[in-house]
Structures are given as C-alpha cells and as structure tokens.
Image (spheres, helix red, strand yellow):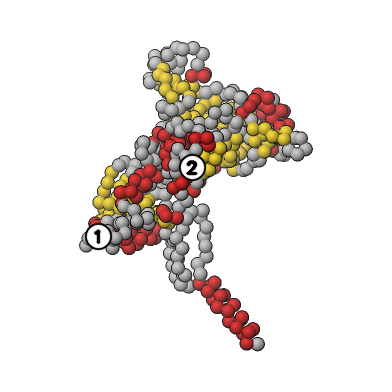
Amino acid sequence: MELTNHIRQRVFQRLCRAQVLPRSHHSGCAQHATGPAVANSKRIQPTLLVSRLYQPSNLRDVGQDIRLQGEVTCKSQRLMQQAGLIHPSSPGCYYYLPAIVRSMEKLVRLIDQEMQGIGGQKLDMPSLCSADLWKTSERWDLMGKELFRLKDRHGADYCLGPTHEEAVTTLVAHQTTLSYRQLPLLLYQITRKFRDEPKPKLGLLRGREFYMKDMYSYDVSEEAAYETYDSVRQAYNRLFARLGLRCVQVQADTGNIGGKLSHEFQLPADIGEDRLLVCGSCSFSANVETMSSDSTDCPQCKTGTLVESKGIEVGHTFYLGKKYSHIFNAAFSNAQNKPSVAEMGCFGLGVTRILAAAIEVLSTEEGIRWPGLLAPYQVCVLPPKKGSKVDDASVLAKDLVHTLGETVPHLRGEVVLDDRTQMTIGKRLKDANRLGYPYVIVVGQGALEETPRFEVICQQTGETMLLSKDGLLDLLGRVETV
C-alpha cells in the first residue's frame, strides 16, 4: 500500500509539472529554450541564437571537394557556400540548409500571393511521370538525354518530370463535366524539377535538381487565352518589382515546349548564358535565338539600334494554343452545351534560380545582399565581447531582442542574437556581412549611456546610424516582411 501511494505521488508531481511547461512550437529553426511559464502569464518569445543555427563551419569551406561541386564559377555559388546556405551533394544537386530554406519559403509566399491574386489554384503533381504520357505528346524522344529516365520493377518506363504539361492536361481531361463557366482555369504547383544537364554549373543557376513554379491555364477561346497570358505577365512584373529586381521581358523561342508565343523574363548579368538584344529607343527586346539576321536595326520602332547584353532567365511564359489539350482531349462544355477543346498556356518561374540570380546581381564580392523581403532574418543583434569593458551591455542586447519581438510584431522570428561573445565584434560583423542581414545592431558603450544609443548598420545601403531606442523601433517598424 505504501509503495502504491508513493507511485501515485510521483505521477501526480509529473502531471503538475506538465501543466506549467510551455508547449513546443517547432518552426524549423534553432530556438533558445525558455524556462517554465507561469500559468496565465504572457508567453515570452524564444530568442533565436546564431550559435544554434545550422551553418556548421566544416560545411563552409568552398574548396573542400571539387568533385562534388565542380568548379566554382560565379559569385552567387561562392557566397552561398561560404555563408552556409547550400552544400554540394553531387554534380548539379545541393543540400538546402535552413537559412536558404527560410528565404525560399518567403519567395514561395510571394509567388502564392501573386498567382492566387489572378485566380491561380495550387496543387501538387507527381514527380514520377509515366512514359506513356510523354510518348503520347511525342516528347519522350524529343527531349532526348535531358530526361531522367527509369524503369520500375515491372519494366514500365518513367521519367522525373522537368515540366508537367502532359500530366496536368491529363488531369483536366479526366474532369468530363468541366463547363465554360469554370474557365479560365489556372492550376499551378511549386515543386522540385529534374533535368539531366550534361555539365551542371553556376551553382543553383544551372543544376540537375531545382525548384520551380509552373502554372497551366485553360480558356474558352484564343482571345480569352491571350488575356490570361497578359495577366500572368503582369503578375510576374509585380513580383519582380516587389523583389526590387529589374527584369527585362524579351521575345523568346518556344523550344521543345511548343506553342504560338513565348516571352522570357531575363535578369541582366554578365554571367548570364542568354544573349539579348535590347532597343534603346523603344520597348523592344528579344533573345537572339528569335532574330533571323545579324541586323542591329530595331524591327519595332525602325529607328533604334539593338544593343546586345547577357541575362539570366528567371521566368518564361508560353501560349500553347491546343497543342496539348487536343492530344489529351482536355475539353469543356461551351455555351451551346457542346464539347470544345480548351486553349492553353503555361508559365514558369525558377524559384531557386531567382534566389541565386538575385544574390548574383545584388551582392558585393564579400557579402550577400538580398532582396529585402527574402533575407532569411531581417535583424542581427551583436552584444559586446565577453569580458570587455562594456560587457554589462550584454543584458541590454538580450532585452532589445525581446522588445523588438513584442513591440514590432511582424519582426517576430526575424531577429537573431549573435551570442558568440567569445568572438570580437569585428569577427561577428564580418559573418553578419557575409550572410547579409539587412540590419545589424551593435550594442556597445552607447547603450550604457543615460540615453541609450545603438549603432545600426543598414547593409543594403552601407549606411551606419546611431539611434535611440525609440528611433530604432521607428526604423524597424517600417521594415516590410512576408
């Protein structure tokens, strides 16, 4: 009986402890554990610590394995590996480490906003695609060695999808009750794609495995399909404007996807693999692949001169007509209640390529500079070195992190504390520059003054300011996040 009472007492104590322990909210990033929360008290946000972020130094040696990564041939590849954003797995394939995953998730949220803003509906399709579909569209042979092909245990042929025109059109064709009232229908996904590049290079700019947004549209008529085509192009323009990227929209070849009309969204860059012709007098621009001669006269305004430049393709739009909908019988009931084949378009955005291209064109040689909305974290707070004359300011640094989280709600989860106080401020500033936090706050002697002041470094502009706490909160309160 005494043993039973002892067991009951132990169980009761554990239950009591369980009632006051805070529940864990896993966010996919390192967190500093907080102490037990008092019942009915306001929950304190955990502090994100640089020492806990998964960016191990042994993964940050760019030159450690040439066999895996190939030759480092561009700035973005070098900076992303040095900052611990990516790590080579095999030629053309990379591990995406937590910081770059945060950036990619932010970009995906932006893309979702723009695509759903024009009526897009998100779905997810299999990466493993039946060869029968590709043979039906006659692209099984047309794609050649670019397709990753495999057989299952029964000998059936498959490929890892580089694009999904066949799959999505088969899906739509299975909906035999589709009405003209449901059109335009815009279906999109954001998923991994695969392409057997003969020589992967330039990091995430040209790999064998990558993330892409691909949207497919179905319309009642050619006129309606062109309207949808223009609405997607406008959405792309809005997306790149929000990112602060000056993309050029150029006429392009339809390639092995086919169709009647195509445009590329190119980010001008010296390392770009595409050659562009741009008129300085009007809006005309084109990929050289679409030009039939070496003429430098603008075919649109007739007076301007075409100037050649290089670009990185980050988006592509195609008006397909009935190329795939006819083959797979993607039909709808028209206003006369008769079956009619839908007009199609397809629209791609290179998700990981946008990230790499943005880093390529915005960054310095020493550090990453992000489109503001895509930085993994917006703010990094640097307390003084342990044992220094201003060591007392360390407590103020921790308080500042909590204050930012409580006072500026949209910065919750966006502020990190560089707690590696065994390192000098200089060394930590160098790391902060390498990763590219938009705002770095140094908590030093000024924070101990009667009117505390904080050194704020805006890494996008290179400007350094001394701000009071109110001034700091006002500045960061205007930071846009997604």
Choose between 59 and 213: the one closer to the eye: 59
Question: Mark 2 belongs to which amino acid?
Answer: Ile
In the displayed structure, does residue 39 sit left or right of residue 217? left
| One can see residue 481 in this view | yes
- Judged from the image, the secondary structure of the residue bearing numbered disc 2 is strand
Q: In this view, does 34 lie above or below 143?
A: below
Tag shown at residue 86 = 2
Residue 28 x %, y %? 51, 53
Give the residue at the far left of this rendering.
Answer: 450
Q: How many marks?
A: 2
Residue 369 at least partly seen: no
Q: Position of residue 423 (x, y in %)?
A: 34, 53
Image disc number at residue 389: 1
- Which residue sits at x=52%, y=26%? 263
Secondary structure state at the residue bearing disc 1 = loop
Separation of marks 2 and 1 at Cα, in angstroms: 38 Å
**First of labels 2, 1 by sequence position:** 2
Q: In this view, does 461 lie to the left or right of 5?
A: left
- Mark 1: amino acid: Lys
Q: Furthest residue to the right?
A: 154
